[in-house]
Each structure stands twice: as structure tokens, then as C-alpha cells.
Image (spheres, rainbow, N blue to C red):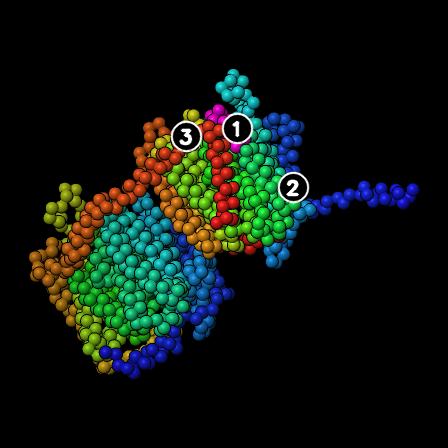
């Protein structure tokens, strides 16, 4: 249970800081806000409409526009630094789509401290990944299409975080889903990629359904979609409504952010090109759920039940992802499982309310840096290894790819929470916040986050050791290798790829410290999300000490298993737990058994009913209309005398009816 | 002597009508262009005419549009206009809005009419020598000599003059004159097709006969109304009919008969039977012009007639008009289902749309006027664009209008098929196209105006209509192309521009309808 005093102070602060969104109209430099979304959108349109004509320069144009968006974002940031207090929150009303009485579908943008963070992250990391892709996709004949989708994604994601109402947010939400679908299935000639894209899309539909229902509920309750009115009015609505909205928003977040029970698509999504995995399925899109919950802080603050559900989902996913990550041999799938687990941290933190919002976002940003860096590193390794993804076929690569090794290594240190690197500051704060929730649930959540920190250290050390250290297992032909197998020649990637990796490595090292300095990040966000310290049942140092101890433990176990012992180049037989983890804890089997098969039976039943009942009716109706049509068209004889007669009859009818209307 | 002389002078002195030429400038410019067009035919050598006609027509219409903008800026703040030409012509919001729309449609139509890249043997969509009997040696000679006629431009301009005058006419005689000015050139234009000349001439004759028939009803109605009120001015009829209670059979019969004349022009059921035959037979650029522009002009006149002359009589005419609107929507949508010719399909679709537009007109409130005007803009450009696409799909016998020829078009020419699909979706009223915004606006206005039953029928008919629109899309994209199917001809920049304008208006009004809706709202007040 939350102790009264902390709740009160939290609520108070939340009210002082974040209560509603009171913002001024965008003016001055802020009036260029629409350009942030507009530039990448322009790129997507130009490249898709321009077609083959834009092939020679498409990638340059897309990258330039992403950078342009970043520059405008920085301009906004500088302008925002100049302002103070409420001046930092601005609204830009672009136009109204279809005004019908109370139904106001506004197209408008909202920029405040929270969306500012996202704008910089999306355009910054997005631009780096555009640059990286120039090298990575150099030999792909559909490179222009790839960059068009990438720009489309950036635009949609920016719309998602800049929308000033839930309806427009939904547009961005679906937009990123579309871009994600297109990019996962980018190599659609591979059946696995096509299936993965479909899987991601369908699982996301479930979440999107939640968001749609949440928006319906908001409209019926508040009669508006705008953040300002919905969030401002959330204190006035009934608890039941707020809980329902909160749970539906959680469902949406689960879908987009691959949280339990809608997590199964993320691993398969790694079928997309690696830059996509880095940008969409690590740094930005999958964190949209965290944004949604943080943005809707007032709704969750009004419903402790929904908040509890959020923390439970986060806690389950933290462990789920970490356990799966321990057993994966595919480097990208191991990183994907890690992403799931790290987002679990963020969701958990967001569920803690004002104690956790700021840290959720802080972890989101630092994670954006190091996970994007790790993925780009993985891509660089694959680039040099003939697109091999099985870590059992790696080993000893540090000599061949020094830059990749160093940048990946820094990302690795950051994610396990090595002291003074980015992940250390953000993760440690989440663990503290979990304990600070107080009560039994606080202890449970604290323990879960600590355990996951240990597991994170274990599986990431495993990835690191299997890839860059040990015997060079790729030199020997794998069992059952095709006749034309030849030994890969690992080599460092070109500058366009290593450059972004180096920049992201800087972020992985320094971002956390910078944010933690003077609590600057928390202070920055407090006006939007509110902040309260909570009530830590022990000293901060104790929590930090325990966390470091768990990390050391996890690292040590991994070291014993994968550095002191030979790594077999084929996965050995293992305990049922490991097998379960290798198979994603049977998530696909469970989904199949619980949802797919019953779903198939249900569809069969519906198809039967549809054929017999609905089609009979509809078909009959259609046949009736069609038959009527065939009969009536015969009146159209082509003889002008018939036409004249029908006009004359019609005139008589009109005159007669007019006269009768008076009588009646 | 001197007193007698003065007296004589005083008697013979006639007050010359004061005409404010500035306020009539859009109409006068287009009329001038038409006259110049006739002079070009008379005095310029044949090879120079095409270029001259095209330039004069386009420049004239652009100038007229500029005059409209200038007049609209001059409207007083309350957006009420003024009545000029001795009470015969109203220069107010609806006039200017609809005249502007007509001019834009006219510009796009002239671009289509001027297209000369589509016929493999050269020439445009019009007969090389209209006077030659179809199939005669004379016709073959004219075709072989590569003759083209340029009378279509002044004819189209004269028709446009009538259309500009029609929604602005503030008395019934002026309205009748405008009706005839717009109709007579159209009858001729319908008969000028280069291919299928018999069909084209049959269409022209049918249109002429039935048009004359409906004009007679209109004129007879005018006589009745004059008999009742002692005036042909809409205002005076409005005053006289406001207090009508009994002994008003003249009024009721008169209003019904005038309505019949107007309903004929918009192609409402049961006065629609000419539409499919004429749309099919007329040269396709003319069909597009007629379908888009005639509707705009006729609905403008109809709204002025009902809103200015008969607002007090709404309880008498509304039930009948509701019946007509329902019949129009249902008949248009249902009969369209079994059509196998693209042009006839579009003709029935235009009938159904006349029903939807009537729905907005019947609302009898400001929203009704503005939504009807918005619908007319949206519908006009979609129609013109759709007919423009029809001109591009051709085989050896000219335009391949039979639907079976359109199978698999999406595989061969994804761009053209995609554009046509966009227009069809707009006709069907799918969101993010102008069709949705327009339907939404008229249904909303009708619901507010207390015509809920119309809205229900309208939505049901939209569903039926969606069936045949989508069927064409399915045919284009999901059917195997025929081996000897038609080809899509690459047009000149003129048709491309007209289609691009249609696409742009369709998309922009779908995504961003507000500015035009606002403009229509501001322009929704009739001057009394």
C-alpha cells in the first residue's frame, strides 16, 4: 500500500506541476513546430510518389530531411530553454478536420518538456540511423523505398508524440504501426519476414483496439479528445470510467511496446533490416507505450487499480524478457528480448505514478542510446560475417572489428548498469522508485527489478563473450554446411556505419550522468509529469549496493559459463527451463492454443453462420436490388416518346402532390 | 408651343435602365469572349483558330475569375450582396461562389476540349465536319483531310454565360433566358462527337426535344406565378406568397411547374431519363462539362428560387421535394448496379448525386445552402476528373467505355487506374476524399433541418452506390487484363492538368475541407 503522506505529496506536486496541460499558442520560433513533422513527411511523400526517378539521391534526401527535422527540434529546444514555467508548453493549432457540434477533430501539435525529450530522441537517433543505413543498405536495390519508409516512420512517430489530442495521437500510433509493418517485411521475398510483419501487425491490432476503445470512452465521458480537457477533467470522472480508460490504454501500450501478454511479435520483428530493429524496435516505436502512459499520467493517477495493473505487466515483462534473453543464440533476438525486458522496467516505473514517471522517461532515453548502439553494433558484426546471426558461429571478433567491439562494449557496460555509465543512473533510479512505492508491493517490485538487473548482466555478458571473445568458431564449417560454404572474412564496417555507432556510444556513456547531475532531468520533466520522492524503506546507497552486487553476480556467472568453458558451436541439450527460454517460454504455443485455435474455430463457426444466415439475407437483398435494377432499367427504352411521357407523368405527379400537401 | 414641346419631351423621356457594369463584369467578360470567338471563326485563317480560340477562352475565364474575386472582396461585412440590373440579377454570396466554381470547372473543361493528342489520326474529340452525314463519303474526306472545327469554343463559352447567369438570376424571366442560353449551345455540342456519330446526334436530338419540353413547363409555371403575384421578380413573389392561405392554386401549380423545369436540368427522377442517353452519346469532354457545370448552375437557380421566392411556402413544397430526392437517390443507385458502360454508369451515379445534393437543398437553412455549394464544388471536380480519365482509355474504335474492357487496367496503367479509383472512392463518399466531406455536410444540414428520413435513405443509398463504385475498382485491380484490351493513351499537358486539378481538389477537400466550408458558410446568404 502507498503511504498516505507520500501519496498526498505526490498528488500535490502532480497538481502543482502537471495538472492539465495549460499551454500558450505557439509563436516566435515555436511556430516552426509543424516543420518537425512536416520535413520527414515530405521526404516520404517525395520518395514514394517520385518513384524510380528519386533512386540516385533518395537516401541523401531522406537523411537530409531527417537531419533538418533534428535541427528544427534543437531550435525548439533552445527556444524552450529560454522560456520559463508555462511558457515552455505550447500548442500549435493547424486546422480542424471535421467540426460537428462537439466532435472536434483538431489537427494540432503540442510541445512541452515531455514531447521535447521525444522529439530530440527520435530525430537525433533517427538521423544517425539514416546515416548508418546509407552504408548498410548500399547494395539493396530497394534502398529508396527503405528510406521512404524510414522517413514515414519518423514523421508518424513525431506526430504520435507531438499530437495535442488522442485522436491525432492515434493517427501517429497507426502510422508507426504501418511503417513498422512495412519495414519488418521489407525483405518480403523471405517468407519468414513476411510472416513476421503480419504477426507484428496483427498483434498490434489487439493493442490498437484498446487505444480505440480508450478514445471512445474519453469522448463519451468528456466529449473531447484534447489532452488538455481529458486530463484536466480526469479528476471529475468516476473511478470505474478512469480505470476502464486506464486499462484500455495499458492494452494499447502492451501491444506497441511488446509487453506481456502481447510480447510475442518483437522477437520475430528482427527479420527486418538491422537499422530498423535499432530505430523502431529498440529506441523509439516500442517505447510509445511508455509515452502513452506517461502522457496520460492524470488518468492513471486517478485510478490506482489501473496503475497496479501497469506495474504488474511491467514486472512480468521485465523477468520474461530477461529469462528469454539468457537462452537466445541469435544475437538480434537476444537483444530483442533485452529490449522487451528494459521496456518492462519503463512500464513498471510509469506504473508507479509521480515517483516513477521521470525515471521511466530517463531510462527510455538512455536505453534509446545504448540499445540503438548495440543493435547497430550487431548489424556491423553481421555485415562483416555474411549476415550470420548465430552467436555460436561468432567468437574472437574483437581483433577484426575494433571499433564495433569498443562501441558495442560501451553499450554493453551501459545496459548492465556499470557504475557511472548511462544505464547505471536510470536503472538504479527505477529500482529505488520500486522500493519507494512502499508496502508489500514495493518490496516485490523492488526484488523483481533487482533480480532482472542480475539477469541483464548475465545475458548481456553472454552476448559479449560469445561474440567478441573466445575461440574463432566461424573458421570451421558448420555441420551440414552447403558445398559452397566458405569461411567469412570479418572486417570493420565503413565510416557511415561506425560514425553513428561512435556517437551513440558517447550517449551510452555520458547521457545518464548528465541527466542525473543535479537531478536536471527530473526537474525538467516535473512540470509535466509531477514528481514525488516516495518513501524509500532503506538508504539509497543500500539499493545501489545491492544493484551493483546483483550485476557483479550475473556477470560472474556468465563469465564462468562462457569464458572459462568452451562455447559449443551447436546449442547443447539443456534443462527444461533453458529449453523453455529458448522457445520464448512457449509464448507462440500458448498464443496458438489459447487464441489462435479457438479463434479459428470461432471464425469457422462465424463463416458457417455467415454463409447460411447472413449471406442468405444479404445475398437475397442484393439479388432483390439487382433484380429490381435489371427490371427498372428496361424502362430506359431509348425512345424519346417514352421519356417525354414519363416526364409528363412526373409533372402531373409533382403538381398533384404539391396541391395535396396543402390539403393534408 | 414651348410648353407643349416640353410636355412632349417629358413624355418621351425614358429612364434608361441603370446597369452597374462592374458588378456584372464576370458574365460580361465571358460573353465578350464568346463573341470574340465567333469573330475568330469568321476572320482568322483556319490553322490559326485553334490556338487563338484556346487562348482567348482560357484568358477570358481567368479574367472573369479574377473579377469574381474582386467582387467577393467588395461584399459588405455581413456578406449580403446587392441586386443590380433593375432587379434582374443578384450579386451575392451564392452567386459569386457558384460563378467562381463554374469558371474553374469551365477552365478545366476547355483544357479537356482542347486535347488533341488522343485520336491516333489526329484531331480532337469533335466531328471534322458536323454537317456531313454520318458514314458518308463527305465525312470520310473531311476526316482524311484532317479537318478540325473550333466552333466548340464559342459554343462552350455561350453556354457558360448562361450558366453564370442562371444562379444569379433574380427574376423568373431572366432565369428562363439564362436557362435557354445555357441549354441551346449544349444541345449542339452533344451532337458533335467524332466517333459514334449516330449515337451522338441521337443524344443531341433527345436532349433538345426533352429540354424544350421541360422549358415549356418552366415557362408555363412562370406564367402561373405571374398570374398569382403580378410580378416575375423573386422578391415580389416571395412577399406575395408569404401570406398565402387560400385561393392559391395558381401559386402551387406554378411553383410545381417551375420546379419541374429545374429538376429536369439537374437530372432528378422522374425527369432523369435523358441523362444516361445524352451522357453516353455526347463527346466525353462535353459530358464532363455538362455533368459538372450544369448541375452547379441549376442547383444554384433552384436554391435561389426556393429560398428567395418561396421561403414561406416550405410546408407545401418540402414534402414533394423530399419525395423527389428519395426517388432520385434510390433510382440512381439501384439502376447503376446493372450498367455495363462506364459513361452510363457515371450518368446514373450523377442522378444519385443529384438526390444527395437535393438533400442539402431541402434542409432550408444556412447550413443547407453552404453544404450544397460545398458538395457542388467537390462533385464537380470529381466528375470532370472521372470523365477525363474515360477519354484516355481507348482501343481501335475510340474510347473503350464498356466495363469489361476496363478489367485489369490497374495492372497495365496503375497510375490512371489509381486516379480513377480515387474518383470512384470520392463518389462513394469514403473518408479523406472530398465526397465524404460533402456527403457529411449535406446530411448534417438535412438532419438539422428536420429531414431525418432523407438522411436515412441517403445513407442507405450511399451503401448501395458504394457497391458499384467498388465493383469497378475490383474489376480494374483484381481481374486479369484482356488480351485485346484497351490501351491508355498518354495525353498532352492539358488533360493531365485537368485530371491533376480534379485529384488535387478531391484530396485537399477530403483532408482539409475547412477553408472551403468556411468560405461556403460566409457565402450562404441570399440577397432579398
Q: Earlier in the sequence, mark 2 or mark 1?
A: 2
The one nearer the camera, B434 or B257, is B257
Comes first in the chain, label 1 or label 3: 1
Residue beneath disc 2: B28
User: Mark 3 near mark 2, Cβ–Cβ under 8 Å?
Assistant: no
Q: Residues within 10 Å of mark 3 (few under 14, many from 20)?
A: many
Disc 3 designates what residue? Answer: B400
Residue that sits furthest to the right in the current view: B1
Q: CA distance from mark 1 to mark 3?
A: 24 Å
Mark 2 and mark 1 residues within 8 Å of each other at the beta carbon: no
CA gap, disc 2 to disc 1?
Answer: 30 Å
Alpha carbon distance from label 3 to label 2: 39 Å
Residue at position x 45%, y 67% in the image: A90
Q: Main secondary structure of the magenta part?
A: helix
Q: Closer to the N terminus: mark 3 or mark 2?
A: 2
- Numbered range of the magenta stretch: B191-210
Amino acid at each position: 500500500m502507498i503511504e498516505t503522506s507520500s501519496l498526498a505529496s505526490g498528488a500535490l506536486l502532480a497538481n502543482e506541476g502537471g495538472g492539465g496541460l495549460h499551454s500558450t499558442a505557439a509563436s516566435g520560433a515555436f511556430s516552426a513546430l509543424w516543420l518537425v513533422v512536416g520535413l520527414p513527411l515530405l521526404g516520404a511523400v517525395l520518395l514514394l510518389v517520385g518513384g524510380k526517378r528519386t533512386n540516385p539521391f533518395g537516401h541523401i534526401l531522406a537523411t537530409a530531411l531527417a537531419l533538418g527535422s533534428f535541427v528544427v527540434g534543437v531550435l525548439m529546444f533552445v527556444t524552450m530553454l529560454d522560456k520559463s514555467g508555462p511558457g515552455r508548453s505550447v500548442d500549435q493549432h493547424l486546422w480542424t478536420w471535421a467540426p460537428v457540434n462537439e466532435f472536434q477533430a483538431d489537427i494540432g501539435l503540442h510541445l512541452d518538456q515531455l514531447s521535447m525529450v521525444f522529439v530530440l530522441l527520435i530525430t537525433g537517433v533517427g538521423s544517425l540511423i539514416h546515416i548508418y543505413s546509407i552504408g548498410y543498405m548500399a547494395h539493396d536495390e530497394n534502398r529508396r523505398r527503405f528510406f521512404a519508409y524510414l522517413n514515414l516512420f519518423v514523421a508518424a512517430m513525431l506526430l504520435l508524440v507531438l499530437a495535442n489530442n488522442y485522436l491525432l495521437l492515434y493517427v501517429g500510433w497507426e502510422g508507426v504501426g504501418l511503417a513498422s509493418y512495412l519495414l519488418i517485411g521489407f525483405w518480403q521475398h523471405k517468407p519468414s519476414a513476411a510472416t513476421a510483419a503480419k504477426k507484428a501487425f496483427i498483434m498490434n491490432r489487439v493493442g490498437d483496439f484498446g487505444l480505440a476503445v480508450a478514445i471512445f470512452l474519453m469522448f463519451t465521458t468528456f466529449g473531447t479528445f484534447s489532452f488538455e480537457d481529458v486530463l484536466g477533467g480526469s479528476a471529475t470522472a468516476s473511478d470505474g470510467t478512469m480505470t476502464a480508460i486506464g486499462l484500455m490504454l495499458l492494452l494499447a501500450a502492451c501491444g506497441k511496446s511488446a509487453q506481456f501478454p502481447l510480447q510475442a511479435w518483437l522477437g520475430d520483428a528482427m527479420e527486418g533490416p538491422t537499422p530498423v530493429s535499432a530505430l523502431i524496435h529498440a529506441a523509439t516505436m516500442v517505447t510509445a507505450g511508455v509515452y502513452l502512459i506517461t502522457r496520460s499520467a492524470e488518468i492513471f493517477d486517478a485510478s490506482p487499480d489501473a496503475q497496479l495493473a501497469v506495474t504488474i505487466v511491467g514486472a512480468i515483462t521485465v523477468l520474461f524478457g530477461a529469462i528469454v534473453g539468457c537462452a537466445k543464440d541469435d544475437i538480434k533476438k537476444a537483444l530483442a528480448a533485452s529490449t522487451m525486458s528494459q521496456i518492462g522496467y519503463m512500464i513498471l516505473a510509469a506504473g508507479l505514478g509521480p515517483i516513477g514517471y521521470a525515471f521511466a522517461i530517463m531510462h527510455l532515453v538512455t536505453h534509446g542510446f545504448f540499445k540503438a548502439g548495440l543493435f547497430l553494433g550487431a548489424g556491423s558484426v553481421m555485415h562483416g560475417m555474411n549476415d550470420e546471426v548465430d552467436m555460436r558461429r561468432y567468437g574472437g571478433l574483437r581483433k577484426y572489428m575494433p571499433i564495433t567491439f569498443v562501441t558495442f562494449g560501451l553499450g554493453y557496460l551501459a545496459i548492465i548498469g556499470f557504475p557511472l555509465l548511462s544505464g547505471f543512473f536510470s536503472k538504479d533510479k527505477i529500482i529505488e522508485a520500486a522500493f519507494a512505492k512502499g508496502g508489500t508491493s514495493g518490496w516485490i517490485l523492488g526484488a523483481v527489478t533487482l533480480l532482472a538487473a542480475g539477469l541483464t548482466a548475465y545475458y548481456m555478458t553472454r552476448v559479449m563473450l560469445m561474440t567478441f571473445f573466445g575461440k574463432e568458431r566461424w573458421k570451421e564449417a558448420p555441420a551440414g554446411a552447403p558445398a559452397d560454404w566458405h569461411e567469412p572474412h570479418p572486417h570493420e564496417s565503413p565510416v557511415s556505419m561506425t560514425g553513428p555507432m561512435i556517437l551513440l556510444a558517447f550517449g551510452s556513456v555520458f547521457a545518464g550522468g548528465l541527466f542525473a547531475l543535479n537531478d536536471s532531468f527530473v526537474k525538467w520533466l516535473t512540470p509535466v509529469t509531477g514528481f514525488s520522492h516516495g518513501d524509500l524503506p532503506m538508504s539509497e546507497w543500500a539499493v545501489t549496493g545491492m544493484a551493483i552486487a546483483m550485476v557483479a553476480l550475473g556477470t560472474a556467472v556468465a563469465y564462468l559459463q562462457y569464458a572459462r568453458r568452451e562455447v559449443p558451436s551447436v546449442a547443447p541439450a539443456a534443462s527444461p527451463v533453458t529449453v523453455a527460454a529458448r522457445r520464448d517460454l512457449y509464448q507462440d504455443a500458448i498464443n496458438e492454443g489459447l487464441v489462435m485455435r479457438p479463434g479459428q474455430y470461432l471464425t469457422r463457426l462465424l463463416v458457417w453462420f455467415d454463409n447460411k444466415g447472413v449471406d442468405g439475407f444479404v445475398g437475397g437483398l442484393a439479388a432483390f436490388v439487382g433484380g429490381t435494377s435489371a427490371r427498372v432499367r428496361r424502362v430506359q427504352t431509348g425512345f424519346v416518346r417514352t421519356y417525354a411521357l414519363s416526364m409528363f407523368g412526373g409533372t402531373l405527379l409533382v403538381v398533384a402532390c404539391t396541391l395535396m400537401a396543402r390539403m393534408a | 408651343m414651348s410648353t407643349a414641346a416640353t410636355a412632349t419631351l417629358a413624355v418621351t423621356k425614358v429612364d434608361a435602365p441603370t446597369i452597374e457594369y462592374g458588378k456584372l463584369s464576370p458574365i460580361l467578360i465571358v460573353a465578350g469572349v464568346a463573341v470574340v470567338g465567333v469573330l475568330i471563326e469568321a476572320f482568322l485563317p483556319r490553322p490559326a483558330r485553334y490556338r487563338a480560340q484556346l487562348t482567348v477562352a482560357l484568358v477570358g475565364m481567368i479574367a472573369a475569375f479574377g473579377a469574381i474575386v474582386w467582387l467577393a472582396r467588395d461584399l459588405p461585412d455581413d456578406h449580403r450582396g446587392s441586386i443590380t440590373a433593375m432587379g434582374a440579377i443578384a450579386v451575392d454570396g451564392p452567386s459569386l461562389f457558384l460563378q467562381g466554381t463554374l469558371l474553374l470547372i469551365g477552365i478545366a473543361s476547355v483544357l479537356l476540349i482542347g486535347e488533341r493528342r488522343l485520336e491516333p489520326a489526329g484531331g480532337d474529340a469533335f466531328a471534322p465536319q458536323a454537317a456531313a452525314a454520318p458514314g458518308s463519303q463527305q465525312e470520310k474526306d473531311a476526316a482524311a483531310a484532317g479537318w478540325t472545327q473550333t466552333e466548340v469554343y464559342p459554343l462552350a463559352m455561350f453556354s457558360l454565360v448562361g450558366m453564370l447567369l442562371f444562379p444569379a438570376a433574380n427574376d423568373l424571366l431572366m432565369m428562363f433566358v439564362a436557362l435557354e442560353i445555357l441549354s441551346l449551345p449544349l444541345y449542339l455540342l452533344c451532337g458533335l462527337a467524332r466517333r459514334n456519330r449516330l449515337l451522338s446526334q441521337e443524344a443531341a436530338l433527345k436532349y433538345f426535344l426533352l429540354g424544350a419540353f421541360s422549358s415549356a413547363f418552366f415557362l408555363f409555371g412562370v406564367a402561373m406565378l405571374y398570374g398569382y403575384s403580378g410580378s416575375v421578380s423573386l422578391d415580389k413573389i416571395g412577399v406575395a406568397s408569404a401570406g398565402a392561405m387560400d385561393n392559391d392554386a395558381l401559386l402551387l401549380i406554378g411553383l410545381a411547374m417551375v420546379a419541374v423545369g429545374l429538376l429536369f436540368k439537374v437530372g432528378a427522377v422522374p425527369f432523369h431519363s435523358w441523362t444516361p442517353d445524352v451522357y453516353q452519346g455526347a463527346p466525353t469532354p462535353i459530358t464532363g462539362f455538362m455533368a459538372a457545370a450544369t448541375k452547379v448552375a441549376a442547383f444554384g437557380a433552384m436554391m435561389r428560387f426556393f429560398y428567395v421566392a418561396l421561403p414561406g411556402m416550405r410546408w407545401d413544397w418540402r414534402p414533394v421535394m423530399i419525395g423527389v430526392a428519395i426517388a432520385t437517390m434510390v433510382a440512381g443507385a439501384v439502376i447503376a448496379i446493372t450498367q455495363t458502360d462506364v459513361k452510363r454508369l457515371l450518368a446514373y451515379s450523377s442522378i444519385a448525386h443529384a438526390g444527395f445534393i437535393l438533400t442539402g437543398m431541402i434542409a432550408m437553412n444556412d447550413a443547407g445552402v453552404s453544404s450544397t455549394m460545398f458538395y457542388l464544388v467537390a462533385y464537380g471536380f470529381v466528375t470532370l476528373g472521372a470523365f477525363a480519365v474515360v477519354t484516355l482509355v481507348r482501343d481501335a474504335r475510340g474510347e473503350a467505355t464498356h466495363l469489361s474492357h476496363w478489367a485489369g487496367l490497374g495492372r497495365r496503367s496503375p497510375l490512371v487506374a489509381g486516379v480513377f479509383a480515387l474518383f470512384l472512392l470520392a463518389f462513394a463518399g469514403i473518408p479523406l476524399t472530398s465526397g465524404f466531406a460533402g456527403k457529411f455536410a449535406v446530411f448534417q444540414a438535412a438532419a438539422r433541418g428536420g429531414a431525418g428520413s432523407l438522411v436515412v435513405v441517403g445513407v442507405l443509398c450511399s451503401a448501395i452506390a458504394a457497391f458499384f463504385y467498388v465493383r469497378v475498382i475490383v474489376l480494374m485491380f483484381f481481374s486479369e487484363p484482356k488480351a485485346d484490351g484497351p490501351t491508355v493513351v498518354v495525353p498532352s499537358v492539358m488533360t493531365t492538368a485537368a485530371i491533376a486539378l480534379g485529384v488535387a481538389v478531391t484530396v485537399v477537400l477530403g483532408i482539409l475541407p475547412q477553408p472551403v466550408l468556411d468560405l461556403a458558410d460566409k457565402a450562404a446568404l441570399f440577397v432579398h
